[in-house]
């Protein structure tokens, strides 16, 4: 074993600390059995290791040392006094917490009742007069008016949808045919307004009608509502929200405000969020291959898999590599706790990428592209006689379908990212020369020629003693 004999220090340190594998230990024992020099060095290493362990074990504190230190620190810290400390101690009581919560709830209820108990106003007008007639009649008139408003909106929504697909928006832009209706107020007066409530203040209010005419107008509204066709089963709600009703004196451009973009989503802040979790862990292990096998087993236990694995040999002969693990997001924390037990943790990083906006933007573009595809297909079905037009439509249809496929692939890729969390594990084998550096010995040979040998030897010995070194042997000729 020429390698062990030429560089015995790492082998000796590893053998003393029982860090050699079975094959390495067998080779080392075979070598020292036939090499007297290495055997003597091995005995010296063991003697030195035993001396160090005995010295350090005698200097270790007893088991109650930590408890005494903690007690001394607690006694040295003065106890807090004053109103703040008293309030903090009182608030820790469960009964005090329940009483405070009940008082807060009572205060909130009282404030809410006080805010909602005021008189009702109609816009900027004075207090409403008491209603004429019975309350049931007023409620019936209001219900009929609401039904007529909904019927008018549904009819306009269907007209706008038909005009949009036919390419003729003249009916909506002209503002003609917008129904107006009379709504009976609680005092028995009827006021004229358009089908859009937000346009009631656009023009001057009409003169009030007699109270006796309200029932007749309500009956006409009920008849109009019964004659109106029913809305379609699918997609009716979305079309009702997107319709914009114009009055006779207001243009379409003036009425389109910030609220005309579309209905707001009614989902909660945490619903349908797309989060990509990832982590990076750096470990120092004894054996690289054993650690990779354990990581593979951990991933299988947590319903994951090893995506990629790479390794390389360093200058000191040790292995270093990287393992990428895919695991379910809910099992990420459990996997990280298992990985920390493989070796010494050097670094750990956790992160989360929110791709919700990117995902829903892509989904919206995909929906619009599908609508465009359907429109192009409808154009092809018209069977135009011009071949150039058909070729142009076919070319545009191919481009739209390519965009649809790309966006579908992007959505699938983002779904795959969200489905699994990514853990990047960096593994490095321990370098035994670093922890056993205090056991490694260096030797040097020195030859001196001097006229006064004894004086020179005494000075050299003093220098060696000053550097805390040791002269193992010396020869005077």
Image: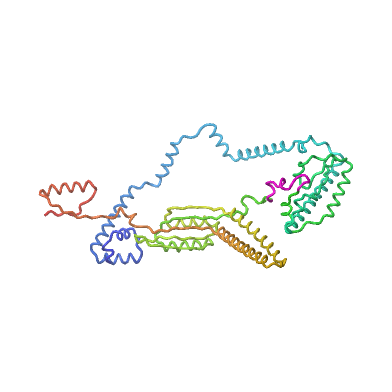
* In the foreground, 293 or 227: 227
Q: Which range of residues does the magenta coloring cover?
A: 246-262
Q: Does the stretch in magenta take in 252?
A: yes
Residue that sits furthest to the left in the current view: 451
Residue 139 spot, x, y in % from top left = 83, 45
* In the foreground, 150 or 296: 150
Q: Which residue is drawn at 24% across and 48% down?
A: 468
Q: Which residue is drawn at 26% across and 55% down?
A: 441
Rendered image quadrant of residue 135: top right
Q: Is residue 343 above or below residue 247?
A: below
Rendered image quadrant of residue 158: bottom right
Quarter of the picture holding the N terminus = bottom left
Q: Which residue is drawn at 51% across and 58% down?
A: 422
Rendered image quadrant of residue 342: bottom left
169 relative position to 190: left or right: left
Residue 17 spot, x, y in % from top left = 33, 58
Residue 137 spot, x, y in % from top left = 86, 44
* In the foreground, 306 or 212: 212
């Amino acid at each position: 074993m020429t390698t062990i004999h030429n560089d015995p220090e790492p082998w000796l340190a590893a053998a003393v600390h029982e860090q050699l594998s079975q094959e390495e230990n067998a080779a080392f024992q075979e070598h020292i059995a036939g090499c007297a020099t290495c055997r003597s060095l091995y005995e010296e290493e063991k003697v030195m290791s035993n001396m160090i362990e005995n010295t350090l074990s005698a200097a270790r504190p007893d088991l109650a040392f930590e408890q005494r230190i903690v007690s001394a620190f607690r006694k040295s810290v003065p106890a807090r006094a004053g109103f703040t400390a008293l309030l903090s101690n009182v608030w820790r009581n469960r009964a005090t917490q329940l009483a405070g919560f009940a008082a807060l709830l009572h205060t909130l209820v009282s404030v809410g009742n006080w805010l909602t108990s005021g008189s009702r106003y109609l816009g900027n007008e004075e207090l409403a007069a008491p209603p004429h007639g019975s309350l049931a009649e007023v409620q019936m008139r209001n219900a009929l008016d609401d039904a007529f408003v909904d019927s008018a909106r549904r009819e306009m929504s269907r007209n706008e949808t038909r005009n949009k697909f036919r390419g003729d928006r003249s009916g909506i832009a002209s503002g003609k045919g917008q129904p107006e209706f009379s709504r009976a107020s609680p005092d028995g007066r009827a006021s004229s307004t358009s089908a859009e409530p937000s346009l009631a203040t656009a023009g001057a209010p009409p003169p009030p009608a007699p109270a006796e005419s309200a029932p007749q107008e309500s009956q006409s509204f009920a008849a109009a509502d019964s004659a109106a066709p029913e809305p379609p089963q699918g997609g009716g709600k979305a079309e009702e929200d997107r319709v914009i009703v114009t009055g006779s004196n207001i243009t379409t451009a003036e009425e389109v405000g910030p609220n005309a973009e579309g209905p707001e989503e009614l989902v909660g802040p945490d619903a349908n969020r797309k989060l990509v979790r990832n982590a990076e862990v750096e470990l120092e292990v004894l054996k690289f291959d054993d650690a990779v096998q354990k990581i593979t087993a951990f991933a299988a236990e947590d319903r994951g898999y090893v995506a990629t694995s790479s390794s390389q040999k360093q200058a000191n002969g040790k292995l270093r590599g990287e393992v990428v693990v895919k695991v379910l997001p809910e099992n990420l924390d459990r996997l990280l706790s298992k990985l920390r037990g493989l070796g010494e943790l050097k670094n750990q990083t956790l992160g989360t990428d929110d791709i919700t906006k990117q995902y829903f933007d892509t989904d919206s573009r995909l929906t619009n592209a599908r609508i465009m595809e359907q429109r192009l297909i409808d154009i092809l079905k018209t069977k135009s006689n011009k071949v150039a037009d058909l070729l142009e439509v076919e070319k545009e249809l191919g481009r739209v379908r390519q965009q649809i496929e790309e966006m579908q692939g992007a959505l699938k890729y983002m779904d795959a990212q969200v489905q699994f969390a990514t853990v990047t594990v960096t593994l490095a084998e321990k370098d035994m020369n670093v922890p056993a550096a205090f056991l490694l010995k260096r030797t040097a040979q020195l030859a001196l020629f001097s006229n006064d040998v004894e004086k020179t030897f005494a000075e050299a010995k003093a220098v060696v003693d000053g550097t805390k070194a040791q002269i193992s042997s010396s020869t005077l000729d």
